[in-house]
Image (cartoon, rainbow, N blue to C red):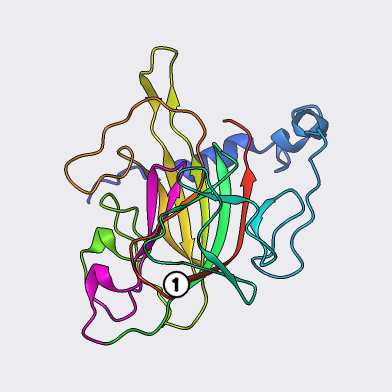
Amino acid sequence: MQALTARRAPPALLMALALLGPCGSRAADTPAALPAPELTEDWTPVRVVTPGPTPGAAPSDAIVLFDGQDLSAWQSANGGPPLWKLDQGELLLVPKTGDLHSKAVFGDAQIHLEFRFPEVPAHITGQQRSNSGLFIQGLYELQILDSYGSSTYSNGQLGAVYKQHAPLVNPARPPLQWQSYDIVFTAPRFDAAGKLLAPARMTVLLNGVLVQNNVELKGPTVYRGQPVYAAHGPGPLVLQDHGNEGIRFRNIWIRPLSAR
């Protein structure tokens, strides 16, 4: 006759039996065995912010940099008046006039802006196809480029942290359609001697689709070579003049975020 081997109950079953009282009730569920629920409740008041009335509209605590009324929040790179145009409530890039800088400077921030590309001839491709850029703190570029059906290097297309991180996907819309960026930017941290303590990070949604997921930035944007950090403080938002005409912007706002 074959010897019987003892069968052991599964660990999960043994744990459940250990928690049961003599009548099958869970001893750990009795009031005497559990802490009061109030011990894990946080009643610290949360600051109230009124959201915008429509998707993409500025919330009540945002600093509005462009709402179609004027360019008073912007200046040229040399500190002079902006040379881009206000056209039918939209901000029109004027080629060869230089970048546009916000007068205010920022650190950690939530940023929203909308942009539209013109139609261009089919033979214009790659980096020449409606090229601009958003430089956060004037240093870290999020590419603005017509990448709908156009080929270029992946870490230089729309949705890329330029020359550092290609977008996860390409949700670009065709020219003449408005597109949007929603960005959460965490500025780098430096100690008193200028040593990097924590690199900058960025999360980006392009047209509502996640394209950068809390990526770590290697340093300020450079066209050639590798980026290198140097200590700096808050900086402006900069819209790039790359020499291409017909690029339009609207609904630009920013929410400064408290330091981590």
The answer to whether residue 209 is left or right of residue 125 is right
Name the residue located 63 percent from the left edge and 34 percent from the top edge.
258
Camera-side residue: 17 or 6?
A: 17
Q: Secondary structure at mark 1?
A: loop
Q: Compared with residue 78, is residue 124 higher up or lower down, i.e. above or below?
A: below
Residue at 63% from the left image edge and 41% from the top image edge: 256
Q: Is residue 132 above or below residue 103?
A: below
Which residue in the rendered view is the most extreme toward the top?
193
Residue type at mark 1: give it: Ile
Label 1 neighbour load within 10 Å: few <14, some 14-19, many 20+:
many
- Could you tell me which residue is drawn at 37 percent across and 50 percent down? 141
Does residue 98 appear to the left or right of 51 in the view shown? left
Q: Is residue 112 above or below residue 255?
A: below
Residue pushed farthest front?
80
Q: Quadrant of residue 128?
A: bottom left
Q: Residue 114, how many percent across, how many down?
A: 54, 67
Q: Is residue 159 left or right of residue 52?
A: left
157 or 69, which lies in front?
69
- Considering the image in quadrants, where does the C terminus appear? top right
Tell me where residue 98 appears, x and y as whole percent: 40, 55
Percent coordinates x, y for residue 144 in the rendering: 39, 64
198, 151: nearer the viewer:
151
**How many labels sit on residues?**
1
Residue furthest out toward the left: 225
Residue 203: say if magenta.
no
User: Residue 230 at x, y = what percent?
Assistant: 34, 27
The magenta-colored residue range is: 122-151
Residue assigned mark 1: 247
Q: Is residue 9 visible?
A: no
Report whether residue 74 is seen.
yes
